[in-house]
Image: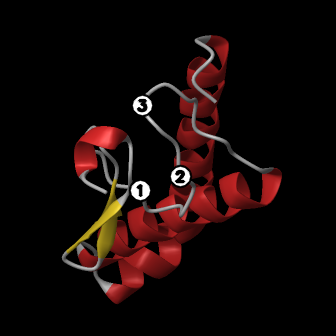
Amino acid sequence: MNARDGSVRQVAGSQVTSDGRSNTTGVTHGPDKPRIWTTQSLRKYFEELIGRELQSCRACMSEANWIEHRDWIEEHARVCLREAVERRAARGEL
């Protein structure tokens, strides 16, 4: 199969769908089918996003600043993610 028929192919260790988007969740879909999310896959994906955001913030801060500000940074990241998910859900993208 090739990428034009809706298949998923491996590129540098990650899956890429036929439309060129990365498929990091392992959920496959064709160009005419919506992405299928389960509660577990969404939760895992969200935790990965939060983890990456916290790593990025941590890398830019001193140890003292990180200790002082970590809680509100994580809370802010979670609120922003929740708002983004709600907007996507309202558009029917989830």
User: Which residue is situated farthest in the top direction here?
Assistant: 91
The crowding category of the residue bearing disc 2, from other C-alpha atoms within 10 Å (few below 14, some 14 to 19, many at least 20), is some
Which residue is nearer to you in this view: 72 or 33?
A: 33
User: Which residue is situated farthest in the front direction here?
Assistant: 1
Q: What residue sits 31% from the left and 71% below the top?
A: 14
Say what amino acid the circle numbered 3 marks: Pro
Residue 51 in picture, x, y percent from top left: 50, 70
- In the rendered structure, are the residues bearing label 2 and label 1 in contact, judged by CB atoms less than 8 Å apart? yes
Q: What residue sits 50% from the left and 80% below the top?
A: 67
- In the rendered structure, are the residues bearing label 1 and label 3 in contact, judged by CB atoms less than 8 Å apart? no
Image quarter hosting the C terminus: top right
> Is residue 20 visible to the viewer in this orientation of the structure?
no
Say what amino acid the circle numbered 1 marks: Asn
Q: Secondary structure at mark 1?
A: loop
Which residue is nearer to you in this view: 14 or 86?
A: 14
Say what amino acid the circle numbered 2 marks: Thr
Which residue is nearer to you in this view: 79 or 12?
A: 12
Residue 41 in picture, x, y percent from top left: 69, 59
Q: What residue sits 69% from the left and 45% below the top?
A: 37
Q: Which mark is residue 31?
A: 3
Q: Nearer the viewer, mark 1 or mark 3?
A: 3
The crowding category of the residue bearing disc 1, from other C-alpha atoms within 10 Å (few below 14, some 14 to 19, many at least 20), is some
Q: Earlier in the sequence, mark 2 or mark 1?
A: 1
> Is residue 81 visible to the viewer in this orientation of the structure?
yes
Q: Find disc 1 in the rendering and name its residue.
A: 23
Q: What residue sits 50% from the left and 73% below the top?
A: 68
Q: How far apart in space, not on screen, are marks 1 and 3 (Cα)? A: 13 Å
